[in-house]
Image (cartoon, coloured by chain):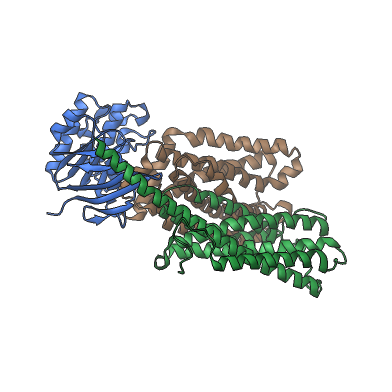
Chain colours: A green, B brown, C blue
Amino acid sequence: MPDLSPVSIARPTGTRFSRVLGIASLVGIAWLVVFGLFLSPNDATQKAGVRILYIHVPSAWLAYLAFIVTGVSSAAYLFKRTRSLTWDRIAGASAEVGVLFMGVTLVSGSLWGRISWGIFWTWDSRLTTTAFLFVTYIGYLAVRGLGGTHQQRARRSAIIALLATLEVPLVHFSVKWWRPLHQQESVAEGKLDGLMLFTLFVGIIAFTLLYVWLVLHRQRVLAMEDALDDQGLDVALAERRAEGAQV
Amino acid sequence: MSTWRIARLIAAKDLRIELRSRVVTNQVLPFAALVMVMFAFALDNDNVLTRVAPGLVWLATMFSMLVLVQRSFAVESADGALDALQVAGVRPGGIFLGKSMALAAQLAVLEVVLLLAAIVLYQAEVAWSGAVLLVTTFLAATTGLAFVGTLYGGLAAGAKGRETLLPLLMLPVVAPVLIGATRATEAAFGTNGASSSEGWPWIGLLVLFAALFGTGGTLAFGSLIDE
Amino acid sequence: MEPVVQLSGVVAVLGGFPVLAGADLTVARGEILLLRGPNGAGKTSLLRLCAGLLPVERGTAIVLGHDIAADRTAARHRVGLLGHSNGLYADLSVADNVAFWGATVGATRDEVAASLDRMGLSGRLAKVPVARLSAGQRRRTALACLVARRAELWLLDEPHAGLDAAGRDDLDATLREAAAAGATVMVASHELERAGALAHRVVDIVGGQVRE
């Protein structure tokens, strides 16, 4: 496990690497804006509505990536030989970012659906699974806030995350069988021209960089919070002992 | 003491508490029947009710189950019994299985009442050819629901004062059971011309679900109830 | 002989607050130890830590030969705790409660009956649901459950509270018998005269630490 956390609370969460990463993701997003809003052409049927996809697809990819990272880090925490609170913090940071991008996915997706299908929502298996994940990980974040020691928090939330991850296929298949005849009219795959595909590609790269940057920083902030708790304990311990000395 | 003996001991204890207190019989069952009547008010049309009867049975089951789970753990945390069980060195896997068994028994009674309510109030018809499928569906779904209920109920009870978390955590998780059990029940009822052979693939899903949460709960319950 | 409880530099945290701030304590087998100290000094936390309910944050803690800092569940099955709450099921009768807690350690019917008898709960009272009992009677029932558990280490938090004179006598006699039979007893109490007469040794708990 690489040490991802600068230990000192006095130090900011940025490092040279994360600064480069931050600048790279900013540049990527600027590119995405230029390509997505100006350079790429309108779609034949969806007109400018197709541009929503440049946000929607990358954020959906990110959301799923984030939950995979949460699942894997949780498993890594539960596995004795790799047990480390760093895994727990990565899982938590990734889930927070994931919930955020899942929200973006759902909103941008229903806007796009309204333009291309005329409806905000359809009970398609992909959509429904996404909504399920969104609610489940809101619950996961609530479980993380339940308190207890760092280890207790880590164990409890790792178990919940792992169960949620294992349940995703069950949800996906149950919805798929439930509505076998849904309109398979999702992303106009193949109908996108070269520039559109390139823009989508730019979006995915930019968002992925942003995700890594966000998780890296958030993870460090979580590490600092934990370190602050521990440091606070030393102060509180001294006070508690002094309480004994007075008597 | 073996996990299995502990499980039987805990299940017997829970059922005895119900026998003495009659909370489920006198409060939860009437509540569930009331929900079925409220559905009828909201969907004021006989045809609709017959068509959606299987879904409403399972929906009412899940809402009533929230109350059952809360009751199941209120009994443990009211006077610190959950702590005492842990100090007594009782295997958490045994607690999990025992409480799941008791919850499953209570759910089964609840489901029979709801099924009868659907037949009486919504004119749902059960064909004899679908009876085997129906019973299997109820067994598989009840087992899965009992495991999930105990797992998340224990988590919410372990974190004292956070019982309000239960619906948020539990309802999304039981979504596959709602879908699977509803479709299988529709097949058993022959709702919308469904044939009973369409129901069996759903049983596979329900069994998989029960296996996942049964295994997960038995292994992980100790960490979840630890305050 | 190896001590039953061996704490050294134990720190325990509850909600970010160090309830135990470096506690050192050694308790020998068969000893009755009285813990005294002001409210909030850490008596309850010390007992809960020995019972494996409160995690050891720092320091070493050996209970009945098990390292509970590494695995706090290790010693649990040999420990009995009577905390502030009684751990009783209100809807069940006195006898059912004692039988249930006895059964968790495989106690026989006779042993359960003996435990009820020991705390003066046999006869008509045994069939009464706990919900209908007075506070003192509930405490007696909880003690009977503890007796039925046949623990090697007894941890009691304010056991005298709520008991009448006869109940206190029963309690003291029970603890003496248990200690004579080789069990180790740790009692946190404000009833200094009574508990002091019972105890072989007294320690003060102050500011999350132990003073001999």
The quarter of the picture where residue C210 lies is top left
Query: Looking at the figure, which quarter contains the N terminus of chain C?
Result: bottom left
Q: Residue A141 location, x and y as percent? A: 54, 51
Depth check, front residue: A46 or B33:
A46
- Is residue B129 in view from this perspective? no
Answer above or below: position of B181 versus A203. above
Depth check, front residue: A71 or B51:
A71
Query: Looking at the figure, which quarter contains the C terminus of chain C?
Result: top left
What residue is rendered at 32% in x and 45% in y?
A238
- Is residue C62 in view from this perspective? yes
Q: Residue A125 location, x and y as percent? A: 68, 60
Side (left or right) of B59 relative to A230: right
Residue extending farthest right: A44
The quarter of the picture where residue B64 lies is top right
What residue is rendered at 65% in x and 68% in y?
A24
Count every numbered label the image shows and give the total: 0
Q: Residue A131 location, x and y as percent? A: 66, 55
Depth check, front residue: A77 or B169:
A77
Side (left or right) of B47 relative to C11: right
Depth check, front residue: C186 or A198:
A198
Q: Residue C34 location, x and y as percent? A: 19, 37
What residue is rendered at 64% in x and 66% in y?
A23
What residue is rendered at 44% in x and 62% in y?
A78
